[in-house]
Image (cartoon, rainbow, N blue to C red):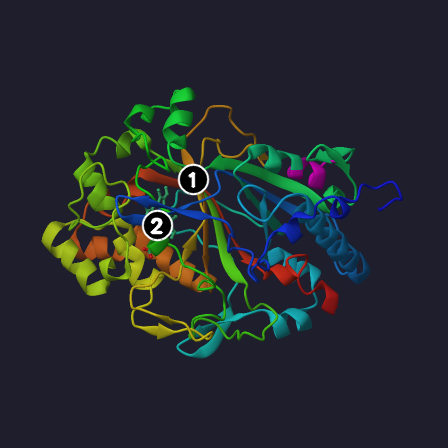
Amino acid sequence: MATETAFNWAEVVNYAKRISTAPPKTQYELPGVTLEDHLGVPVAVVPLWHAVVTARLTLTKGNAKSLKAAQERLSRALEQIEAIYPLNPGGIFIQVAYGLPYFRDYLPARVIDTYMPRALDNGKRGDRALIDAIKFPKDPATLILEHNDISFHFKSDFNEHISDVIRALFHPGTHFLNSIPVENVYVGDLFNMTSIRRGFAGRGMPRTIARRLRIPGADKIPAGAMLFMGFTSSHVHGLAQGKLPSFETIPGYTDQTPESYFAHGTIMHLSHIVIDLEGWYSLDHKDRLHRMFNPRRTEGPEHLSPPQAPETSTFKEQLEDDAKKTGILGHNAQMQFLSRVDKDTTTVYGEVIPKGTALFLRQDFDTVENPFEFNSDAPVSPTPVPGVHFIGFGPSAQLFEKIRKEMDGAELQAKFHLPDENTGFTKFLVTTHRQNYLEPPREHRSFPLAELI
Ligand code: HEM
């Protein structure tokens, strides 16, 4: 609670005010992320360090007063952090998302029935856009479907910012942000933390980190790669830009409009994937290029970021043609008929986007955790393994499900008798955990809907 002695950052320098533009209405847009030119191809230089904290709430279910008090406290804590660190990669980004158990267990049915987005099914209101994650055809029997109430995703170019903020939010005692003790930031009593997951994404980092940890296959990672598997996955053209992944932006996905409570919100999928690096790098450059993109690609090994502009998109007919003619499906080609718009489209905000524009957003990062830094439900192993904490955003969990099924590619594989190693790259991945979340708009990032009960 505030005391007279609390240090007032706003009187020194309030970083939220140093930024000339208003913060985005979404949580997932990242102001200040710069672009880089990779041999003529635009690539986003995403924040270098990442952490995800998942938790279950300690609050008594059905107690409106304690939920409202929690809403105020978390809101104040996040505001205080943003007064200290700018909302850009040099400061910190914090994205808060909520699992189905939060909505189901802490909010009255009448409130969620009124406000939760519904996916459209052939133009009609169908199921809620947030549904439980499923086990996909190629997931292992050991896959864990998680049931967290909340997830925090922290991103910054400075790992210390993330560690300091996690300590101040979740650990009791006196903590420092930018070397000054903070009050009103601790909200740890509201949560039982279930996991901490950390990682990184940045040119040269996967190889350097993997070599330092003597991870088998590390020497094969190209020196300039941003991710373990070599190719760039933050192409400007491969990531949904602006508000495209929000519930309401592209007509036809959900019943949300720009006036809805959850407008500027989205669905997030969080999973952890182990990568068989040695297996992947036993393929030569051309074989990796074809399995990552499509078998028509001809770029040489110096091209870690082959162009992804709308006109390079693969749609269903071409995908089947690839399978028929070459017996190979590329990872992004497998999904582009769903992750990109299939015709010139006008958004609800009047923006015209050409056929082949990506509407699905990925903010995943590499990790060496096995499987997490901390896991309340099972022991973690100190042996580093290369992997990805996958984070993807789109307007409905139903869309994610369709996209992810195509990544396994079981249907086309059976139709064209493709071996596992020619069906994208799922042969080299093992998913250990999954959960879907709803990431509310920034305005409602603290315990959404609590103010309405
Ligand atoms: C180890 C894990 C993964 C790696 C290394 C990886 C890497 C990549 C790369 C390099 C691209 C093409 C470049 C780009 O579009 O920016 C891509 C595209 C894509 N990835 Fe993945 N990916 C992984 C897992 C996943 C998962 C689990 C999904 C979930 C469905 C996914 C969904 C997509 C989609 C939808 C695209 C196409 C985006 C578009 O072009 O519209 N990826 N990925």
Q: Is residue 418 left or right of residue 279?
A: left
Above or below — where is 340 with respect to 209? below
Mark 1, ligand 1, within 8 Å: the answer is yes
SS at circle 1: strand
Q: Is residue 127 left or right of residue 341?
A: right
Q: Is residue 339 magenta?
A: no
**What are the residue bounds of the magenta stretch?**
165-171
Mark 2, ligand 1, within 8 Å: the answer is yes
Q: Residue furthest right?
A: 4
Above or below — where is 207 with respect to 428? above
Three-letter amino acid code of the residue under disc 2 = His
Residue 59: percent from left, percent from top:
75, 51
**How packed is label 1: few (under 14 Cα within 10 Å), some, or many (20 or more)?**
many
Asked whether 250 or 386 is in front, the reply is 250
Residue 380: percent from left, percent from top:
54, 29
Asked whether 245 or 144 is in front, the reply is 245
Q: Is residue 169 magenta?
A: yes
Image point 73% across, 69% down: which residue?
452
Asked whether 197 or 27 is in front, the reply is 27
SS at circle 2: loop
Above or below — where is 248 with respect to 276? below
* CA–CA distance in space, label 2 to label 1: 17 Å
How many badges with numbers are in the image? Answer: 2
The quarter holding residue 398 reads bottom left
Q: Residue furthest left?
A: 325
On the image, numbered disc 1 is attached to which residue?
A: 388
Three-letter amino acid code of the residue under disc 1 = Val
Image point 26% across, 45% down: which residue?
292
Residue 262 shows up from this direction: yes
Among numbered discs 2 and 1, the one appearing first in the sequence:
2
Q: Is residue 118 left or right of residue 229?
A: right
On the image, numbered disc 2 is attached to which residue?
A: 235
